[in-house]
């Protein structure tokens, strides 16, 4: 602890780091001790963006791990570094705010989860859609039975912004669904409160900006018997779009529009404004709510419901989709 607050540090000063930093600065139980990155210019940019003049600047990740004033470490580095850095943080006794994905292959994921279990590490994943007010409303309606028996869940992640650097490399990004579409895969599981048990995938290579297929689709089967169709596109003339379409025998959901049997006179979908901005900008994502939840868990000495373990099935589904797509589109059981 640092002056009665959780000492917090961040490693990796790219785009998503702004969401983490803003959340730390807003939370009264947290004290941002310092930030660091492999590139000094990235650190300087974050200092200027947030006016961070009186914090530590870490040149190496080990410097954070060896800092006894740091309780929570945010890992916001390129995808291929997440697992190894989280493993090191767990061994160093830190709590971990891990940006998605937790890993880019099954072997890394298994090693990470084993290490977390061995060291009894408290973690939370940056799967922020779970804290989106619209997602929480959708989940409450489904859990309360307003949709009846849910049998179909279709989700999309479309975001045609240009991504540079490591995101163009499949060996570093992990693939389309792991890079971005994992948000939608995870929210489908979260809404239905059911794991994915089988997938089959397909993919198409569009252009040469990415060295991997930036468009992937999947058919999925859930443990509760529901089916799903997922799609992810990192390319195309399309703004940030996260579609969530759920159908049950007593109601259905199309994003922020609802059609429920309980309203006998209802003829069309009605909309509910939850104040959610349809934006891919990290400033509009609910990082503060996610961090507030994690801090409460730490204060109460309990594991988060949104920890790494809670997202393992989402990751395994993404891995299997890519593996199926790279093969003959065969069904793969998880």
Image (cartoon, rainbow, N blue to C red):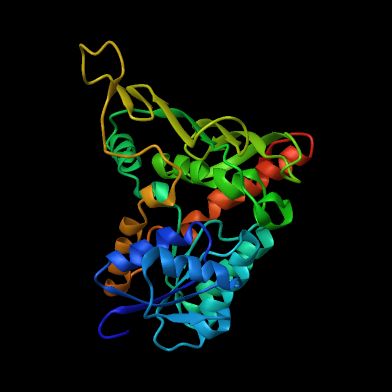
The quadrant in which residue 61 appears is: bottom right
Q: In this view, does 99 lie to the left or right of 53?
A: right
Residue 294, can we see it? no
Q: In this view, does 92 lie to the left or right of 286?
A: right
Q: In which quarter of the image is the N terminus?
A: bottom left
Q: In this view, does 175 lie to the left or right of 99?
A: right
Q: Residue at 61% x, 51% y: name it.
A: 316
* Percent x, y of residue 46: 46, 66
* Percent x, y of residue 12: 54, 68
The quadrant in which residue 231 appears is: top right
318 to 251, vertically: above or below:
below
The quadrant in which residue 235 appears is: top right
34 to 213, vertically: above or below:
below
* Percent x, y of residue 41: 56, 69
* Percent x, y of residue 184: 50, 41
Q: Is residue 26 left or right of residue 96?
A: left
């Amino acid at each position: 602890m640092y002056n009665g607050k959780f000492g917090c540090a961040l490693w990796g000063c790219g785009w998503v780091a702004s969401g983490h930093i803003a959340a730390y600065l807003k939370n009264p139980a947290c004290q941002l001790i310092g930030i660091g990155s492999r590139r000094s210019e990235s650190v300087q940019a974050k200092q200027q963006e947030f006016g961070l003049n009186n914090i530590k600047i870490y040149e190496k990740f080990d410097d954070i791990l060896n800092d006894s004033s740091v309780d929570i470490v945010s890992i916001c580095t390129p995808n291929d570094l997440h697992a190894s850095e989280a493993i090191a943080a767990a061994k160093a006794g830190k709590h971990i705010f891990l940006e998605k994905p937790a890993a880019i292959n099954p072997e890394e994921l298994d090693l990470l989860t084993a290490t977390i279990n061995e060291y009894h590490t408290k973690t939370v994943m940056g799967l922020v859609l779970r804290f989106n007010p619209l997602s929480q409303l959708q989940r409450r309606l489904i859990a309360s039975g307003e949709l009846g028996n849910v049998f179909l869940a279709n989700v999309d992640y479309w975001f045609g912004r240009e991504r540079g650097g490591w995101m163009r490399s499949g060996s570093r990004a992990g693939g389309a669904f792991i890079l971005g579409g994992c948000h939608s895969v995870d929210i489908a599981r979260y809404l239905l409160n059911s794991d994915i048990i089988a997938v089959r995938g397909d993919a198409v290579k569009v252009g040469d900006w990415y060295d991997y297929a930036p468009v992937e689709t999947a058919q999925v089967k859930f443990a509760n018997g529901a089916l799903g169709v997922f799609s992810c596109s990192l390319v195309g003339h399309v703004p940030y779009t996260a579609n969530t379409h759920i159908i049950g025998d007593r109601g259905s959901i199309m994003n922020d529009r609802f059609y429920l049997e309980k309203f006998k006179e209802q003829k069309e979908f009605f909309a509910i404004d939850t104040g959610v901005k349809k934006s891919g900008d990290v400033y509009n994502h609910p990082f503060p709510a996610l961090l507030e939840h994690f801090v409460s868990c730490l204060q109460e000495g309990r594991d988060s419901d949104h920890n790494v373990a809670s997202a393992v099935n989402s990751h395994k589904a993404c891995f299997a989709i890519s593996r199926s797509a790279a093969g003959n589109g065969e069904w793969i059981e998880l």
